[in-house]
Image (cartoon, rainbow, N blue to C red):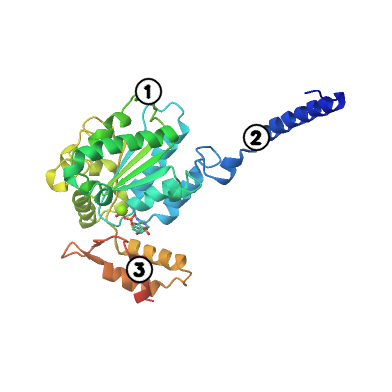
Amino acid sequence: INHFPWTRAAAHTLRLKTQEYVAFTSRFISYINIPCYFRECCQPDWISFNPKGLEVDLQQRLFGQHLASRIILKAVNWFINNDNTKKPLVLSLHGPTGTGKSFVSKMIAQNLYKEGMDSKFVHLLLSTFHFRHVSQIETYRSQLQQWIKGNVSNCERSMFIFDEMDNMPPGLIDSIKPYLDYHHKVDGVSYRKAIFIFLSNAGGQHIVQTALEFWKAGRDREEIKLCDLESALSLSELNDKSSGLWHSSLIEEHLVDFFVPFLPLEHKHVVQCVLAAMEDDGLKPDTSVADQMAGDFIDFPKPERLFSSHGCMKIDSKLPYYV
Ligand SMILES: Nc1ncnc2c1ncn2[C@@H]1O[C@H](COP(=O)(O)OP(=O)(O)O)[C@@H](O)[C@H]1O
Ligand SMILES: [Mg+2]
């Protein structure tokens, strides 16, 4: 085809303009990163640790857990600020029901991910839901491995919370052992920035016993040190069949970085929980109602009636019956 010279010139200019336009637009898009502007990405805009926020949350919103509060803050700070971590952070939280284990896990997520627990990089696994059928353990093993690998390849700063560890089919957790260990990479994937949190009641009875002994001796609860709970968090206690905890080599092989004890909650802590729940509901804090409610919650051990057997669990749903 024979073009007139001016047509060719115009076409050439147009082509140049189009190329320029495309180049400019793509530079612009990559500069402001449009997809990650609107949707959560595995980037600092969406994942950045707020140490002060975690400290304040632990100090002001978590009641009666001086040990857990201290250990969690130290552990998370140390891990996030360390660029040369050799393995993922593995925390194992132990204690009676309703004492703040899930609550604290949520606080960590909220101060690390902009989307908190709703982040697509935070994963909650419930044993009674996700691993219901003990007979399918082999399937679960490979599924769990693949699933964790997929998530960590997608974002190395991923967080996995394993709730109800007591109900986990024995041996299942061992399938993720290679990921928790000191490996540079497993199968091309590095797990060194991931966070694993295990929640269980194992050791809980022993922790309660220790808290009771301190009380009987007239000693302050805050005097309880981690070493006083050493036997509660020992290998034999946590691997005891009756504790129902995974019979795993995780503990023996020192893959858990921090064991975090949660103490049973006393009357004054339940009062604090009720007052906090009232504030959350936009109600005027009423100490006499909180006192009455706490009185109903405190139910064990039998003669002393010192602790709440369900901690601060279900306070928000019971509150309407009291106010
Ligand atoms: N130590 C605590 N301080 C403040 N609130 C608490 C504490 N323990 C429990 N709660 C309240 O009770 C609710 C249930 O506690 P949770 O963390 O789920 O218990 P568990 O230890 O069984 O995981 C929490 O969402 C929180 O509102
Ligand atoms: Mg829980």
Position of 123 relative to 280 (above/below): above
Disc 2 designates what residue?
Answer: 31
Q: Nearest to the eye among marks 2 and 1: give it.
A: 2
Name the spot of residue 60 as percent of width and height, x first. 44, 55
Q: Is 66 placed left or right of 94 in the picture?
A: right
Q: Secondary structure at mark 3?
A: helix
Q: Earlier in the sequence, mark 2 or mark 3?
A: 2
Position of 171 relative to 266 (above/below): above
Residue 149 image-quadrant placement: top left
What residue appears at the point 38 percent right and 50 percent down from the top-left corner?
Answer: 104
Ligand 1 within 8 A of label 2's CB? no
Sort mark 3 into few (<14), some (14-19) or many (20+) by Cα contacts within 10 Å: few
What residue appears at the point 42 percent right and 46 percent down from the top-left corner?
Answer: 108
Labelled disc at residue 184: 1
Q: Secondary structure at mark 2?
A: helix
Labelled disc at residue 22: none
Q: Secondary structure at mark 1?
A: loop
Q: Earlier in the sequence, mark 3 or mark 1?
A: 1
In front of the other: 209 or 95: 95
In front of the other: 301 or 40: 40
Position of 131 relative to 4 (above/below): below
What's the amino acid at mark 2?
Answer: Tyr
What's the amino acid at mark 1?
Answer: His
In front of the other: 143 or 294: 143
- Tell me if I can see residue 210 in this picture: yes
Name the spot of residue 3 as percent of width and height, x first. 82, 25
